[in-house]
């Protein structure tokens, strides 16, 4: 069930798979962060997080400006801190954005899974 559908991101709850998907299109600019976080909190409040997988789908994520890229590890750990059973990152198609995600992951202790395509999630 699609919960949020705005030009820069989408949020969906898949009850049968027990997954919450957050897909970013491009990247979230500073002026949208507050609205994004409000939508995220409202979306995840609808489900028991400890039994769901959180999927951050970066398929259509653009390369980030260096200032934002430097904060990517903190953003990933914020998702981990939300209390989900499991966290999955779907790598961006963009090679530059994918390298930015990889570099951010090297700076943190990420307990989740990284895949290259949404279809790989069920393979874990």
Image (spheres, rainbow, N blue to C red):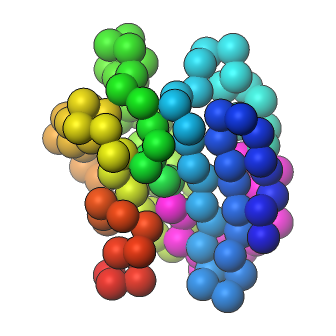
Residue 37 higher or lower than 124, as above or below: above
The answer to whether residue 44 is above or below residue 42 is: below
Q: Is residue 3 left or right of residue 124?
A: right
* The magenta stretch spans residue 53: yes
Question: Is 119 situated above or below 98?
Answer: below
User: Is residue 52 or residue 98 the one in the foreground?
Assistant: 98
> Which residue: 70% across, 62% down?
12
Q: Nearer the viewer, residue 112 or 91?
A: 91
In the rendered structure, does residue 63 fall within the stretch colored magenta?
A: no
- Residue 30: x and y, percent? 61, 15
Residue 7 figure quarter: top right
Q: Judge whether residue 6 can be spotted in this image.
A: yes
Magenta stretch, residue numbers: 40-55
Q: Is residue 110 above or below residue 105?
A: below
Q: How many marks?
A: 0
Outermost residue toward the bottom in this view:
16
Locate residue 50, reporting x and y percent.
60, 74
- Is 110 on the left or on the right of 67, as rendered? left
């Amino acid at each position: 069930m699609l919960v949020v559908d705005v030009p820069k991101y989408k949020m969906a709850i898949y009850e049968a798979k027990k997954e919450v998907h957050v897909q970013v299109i491009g990247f979230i600019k500073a002026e949208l962060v507050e609205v994004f976080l409000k939508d995220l909190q409202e979306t995840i409040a609808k489900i028991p997080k400890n039994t769901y997988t959180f999927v951050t789908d970066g398929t259509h994520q653009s390369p980030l400006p260096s200032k934002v890229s430097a904060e990517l590890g903190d953003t990933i750990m914020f998702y981990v801190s939300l209390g989900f059973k499991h966290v999955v990152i779907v790598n961006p198609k963009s090679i530059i954005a994918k390298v930015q995600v990889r570099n951010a992951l090297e700076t943190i202790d990420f307990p989740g899974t990284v895949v290259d395509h949404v279809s790989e999630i069920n393979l874990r």
